[in-house]
Image (spheres, rainbow, N blue to C red):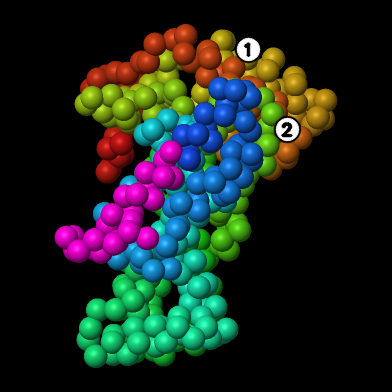
Amino acid sequence: MTYTTTKRDIFAEHYVKKATAARNVANTSLSLESSVGTIPPPAVLTLYRAQVEPHLVYGCEVALDVSDSELKPLRVVQHMYLRRALGLGSHSQLTPLFTETGIWPLRYRRASLVLRYLRYVLRDEPTLALAAVREAWTLAQHGHSSWWSDLCHSLIALPEPVAIALDARPTPDMVKGLLKDVEHSLAQHLYKSVRDSRRLPLLWARFSRLPPTPTLSQVCAAQPYLKLTSTKPREALVRLLTSDHPFGIEVGRRRSPPVPPNCRICRFCRQKAALEDEMHVLFTCEDARLQQVREAQLLQLLLPLLPGARELFGRLEPLAFLNFVMGKERLLAVFAQYVLDVFQLVDTVPFFSVPSDSPLAGPVVANDTV
């Protein structure tokens, strides 16, 4: 590890060096595609765990994350790699990087490893490490900054704080409880991030069926659609679910200045209050071009795999139909190809918006500014 006495955080240079090393390894891993072709996400995530993450967590048992600014270079590398693994753009939402892959956000991953190391020290009692932990605890009781006080601070600073009393003498059972608390904190953080985001309605449609206190495996796990072997359809499906798609509801957000949500009218049907969102374009727009693609590339191709698909489509609400299809692995390839076909059709028609006072504009929703 690298230490410095010229900065407030003695591990500041360590963070920088490990971020540089992680970025170099990440770029090398991702560059394999230029030699062997497209690497599917499960393999890319395996490379992340084996080659990149070790640099991102190196020394985390000692260099506790008391400053978010020092951790930022490492987080940037993690986000870059996961976005590349999923085929997403540099401005895509961060939460899906973890909910869809099963990878933990770096702050949580490092906190978990620190606690696992502490549990090892308290359980196996290696002489020097145990003496250091006890001394750090004693210093904290006398009001001095120490490894123990930094650990307490880093856990409180998690997005969903994990409380630990500064004067609580650490024991293996206490640390075991803290590990469970960190997992619960991460599950709540991801769940609330999806719930509170206006840009992730399709992920929320999946999460909304979960209990208010979901388990970590319910909100942070590699999704079946990542195993699809066709690259472009798979990436189109990922872009749809993460709101990194070409539909007007998202394109309007990125204009400068942003187009009001109620003015992002469907470029196909141009009907009054027909906002160009995911459900409208994929399932309900009555424009002949979209209806033709929907019939030929979705409903007809689903019939051999799902008898009665057309009746099911007519009976269920759009979100319910989407959830049904996404829950059946055998249907994912057809649906992903359909999403890609719709994306390609959307790209042939210019984005359409209207002034706020236009008769076509939808009703203004309070606080709807994105």
Q: Is 29 located above or below residue 122 in the figure?
A: above
Residue type at tag 2:
Leu
Which of the two residues, 293 or 227, is positioned nearer the viewer here?
Answer: 227
Please tell me which residue is depicted at 42% across the width and 30% down the height of the picture. 89
Please tell me which residue is depicted at 32% across the width and 18% down the height of the picture. 353
Locate residue 168, reporting x and y percent: 39, 89
**Is residue 364 toward the left or the right of residue 108 in the image?**
left
Q: Is 249 located above or below residue 359 in the figure?
A: below
Q: How many marks?
A: 2
Locate residue 225, reporting x and y percent: 65, 37
Q: Is residue 164 magenta?
A: no
Residue type at tag 1:
Gln
Residue at the disc numbered 1:
292
Locate residue 239, reporting x and y percent: 51, 31
**On-image quarter of the C terminus:** top left
Please tell me which residue is depicted at 23% across the width and 83% down the height of the picture. 144
Numbered disc 1: secondary structure: helix
What's drawn in magenta, residue-wise? 1-24
Q: Is 162 located above or below residue 349 in the figure?
A: below
Which of the two residues, 209 or 166, is positioned nearer the viewer here?
Answer: 166
Residue at the disc numbered 2:
331
From where the camera sits, is residue 165 visible?
no
**Is residue 288 toward the left or the right of residue 135 in the image?**
right
Numbered disc 2: secondary structure: helix
Neighbours of disc 2 within 10 Å: few (<14), some (14-19), many (20+): some
